Image (spheres, rainbow, N blue to C red):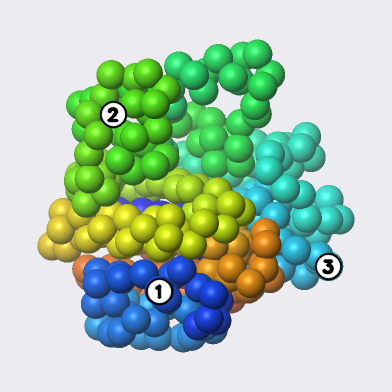
Amino acid sequence: MHMVMIFLDGFGLGGKDDNPIVAAKTPFLDELLGGHLLWGKRYITHNKTVLRPLDASLEVEGTPQSATGQTTLWTGLNAAKAIGHHLHAYPNQPLAEIIAEKSIFRQLADVGKTAMFANTFSNAYDQAISTGKRKHTASTLSALAGGVRLRRVPDLITGLAVYQDMTNEILVQLGEQVAVISSFEAGQNLGNLALGYDFTLYEFFQTDVKGHKQLWDEAIGLVERIDSFIGGFLSVIKEEDVAWILTSDHGNIEDFSVKGHTTNPVPALCWSNHPVMWPEWDTLEEVTPGIVQLLLSEGN
């Protein structure tokens, strides 16, 4: 079995009002769920799809943040409890040490499973890292901890990577000589890539960016882009032995009545072509152990 995680930063399960996810047209997601239902605290089993809400609070007072939420998601260890508070943006040294030891990529490498981080890294990114203008996020640190090669623009050009905005528009703005593609095509590229690995992660963080900016029409368009991406992905993997989960680290884009992150649960939207005993996940820290166990059980 091939396992894929599609990670949407800042994508929670909010109410019906002030919610771009509800306002958007999402035919592919609606078909998976049996209705326009990617909002509210729902437990759904529909055909090959399971949806469970995950508590992103990590049992720590305050609003969930990216560094601790993502570290928790990709290690199985409650990072906010470990450092005593929620931490935004980039992991600090204690979180980096947790990732180095417990990263899902490292855990899978240790048991002989292959893994891929599908995102593309540009020359501009490398320069920003080398000059100290930015730091690696939890996802990148997680991949590096497992010895996973970071994919570059030449990989993207040959269909062997996906950029963080799906369509490559930001890469073009950065001066890279790449073609702008549809989000549907980007989803197809991810599907084809995933068939070569036991585990694949794709990270999309424009949801959190648009949530912070609170641009309603742009947020709706972004959700519709995600839906098209899912459609392209499904068009490739629907007959293959693939299981995938769409999830997040905290809420944001789903509630425009709140400026910034929310305390809403996040989705564990799971799909598989062949029967899978999905864990009854309730929190972020249960996801990595569940994925590792599912992949190990496939080898027995």
- The residue closer to the viewer here, 101 or 225, is 225
- The disc label shown at residue 23, or none: 1
| Amino acid at dot 2 | Leu
- Residue, disc 2: 156
| Amino acid at dot 1 | Ala
Q: Is residue 228 left or right of residue 277?
A: left
Q: Earlier in the sequence, mark 2 or mark 3?
A: 3
Task: Please report the residue visible at 34 percent of the width from the left and 35 percent of the height from the top.
Answer: 169
Corner quadrant of residue 50: bottom left
Closest to the camera, between mark 1 and mark 3, is 1
> In the rendered picture of this protein, how many numbered marks are placed on residues?
3
- Residue, disc 3: 61
Q: Position of residue 190 (x, y in %)?
A: 27, 45
Quarter of the image containing the C terminus?
bottom left
- The residue closer to the viewer here, 166 or 237, is 166
Mark 3 residue crowding within 10 angstroms, few (<14) / some (14–19) / many (20+): few
Task: Please report the residue visible at 48 percent of the width from the left and 48 percent of the height from the top.
Answer: 206
Quarter of the image containing the N terminus?
bottom left
Q: Earlier in the sequence, mark 1 or mark 3?
A: 1
For mark 1, give the secondary structure: helix
Corner quadrant of residue 114: top left
